[in-house]
Image (tube, rainbow, N blue to C red):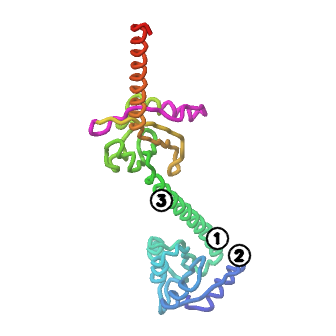
Amino acid sequence: EDSEDDAILVLRELRRGGYEPTFERVDTPQAMNAALDQQTWDIVLSDYAMPRFTMPAALTMVTEKGRGLPFIIVSGAIGEEAAVAAMRAGAHDYVMKNNLARLVPAVERELREAEVRRERKQAEEGLKQSEEEFRRLVEDMNDGYCVLQGSDVVFANARSAEMFGYAQEEVIGKTLQELLPPEIVEKLVEAHVRRRRGESMPPQYETTLARKNGTARWVEFGARLIEYRGKPATSVVIRDITERKRMEQALRESEEHYSALVGNLTDARANSGL
């Protein structure tokens, strides 16, 4: 604002509305830049045309600094075309100096909406940070980890992609039916429905998993209900138990071999009359 008298009128109106503003009046780009850098502000009230500074230049400066400040034009004369252009450029409202009764309601509304924007941005940043931490955690897992929404894979770590025999980006967007044996799909779907009803279900299922190249691995699946990006989802942990199955099979064969030896020895003793 280049007019001190007009600035006083604006301040008087704000005080009448219950505000005790801390303010700085600037009328040059240099002063505006310094004010933005040296102080944290809640709102910018700008005249449209000044001898050494213009509203569009002030709005551009605020926008480029990325402050997200509410920007209200307070002008004695602004045409409809200029007002529309200003709003399209990012101004939040305009108030005529001959109708300052609109100023306080406009300020209240814009401060309220600015707070909503700040809270939304903080929530989005918090969500992004949580997702990054989540990704780091699951990418370090030795087990496969997938997130399903409906029957679609919306997240898969590198280990799960390796188990399926696909590149990681190939797994995203595939359905359960494309990746898993029919019997395990049926069990997972049933478990999902029954968990939604509050019923308890077995924590794990074992099955063989046919990989993209045709080879098979023994795996153990576990699933639970979660929320992913604000929507219901199912997390699936996949553990490769092929080596354990081989050891179990080897143990069974060893026990069978031992039992056969003992049986043969017993038969031999019986036949020899011992």
Indicate left or right for 248 with 19 as reference.
left
Of the two numbered discs 2 and 1 on the same chain, state the one appearing first in sequence. 2
Question: Which range of residues does the magenta coloring cover?
Answer: 189-214
Name the residue that disc number 3 marks.
132
* Three-letter amino acid code of the residue under disc 3: Glu
* Three-letter amino acid code of the residue under disc 2: Gly
Name the residue that disc number 1 marks.
108
Q: Secondary structure at mark 3?
A: helix
Picture disc at residue 17: 2
Question: Is residue 196 magenta-colored?
Answer: yes
Picture disc at residue 12: none
* Relative to 116, residue 49 above or below: below
Quarter location, residue 85 = bottom left
Q: Secondary structure at mark 2?
A: loop
| Neighbour tally class for label 3: few under 14, some 14-19, many 20 plus, Cα within 10 Å | few
Q: Residue at x 52, y 47 (%)?
A: 231
Question: Is residue 112 magenta-colored?
Answer: no
Q: Residue at x 38, y 50 (%)?
A: 158
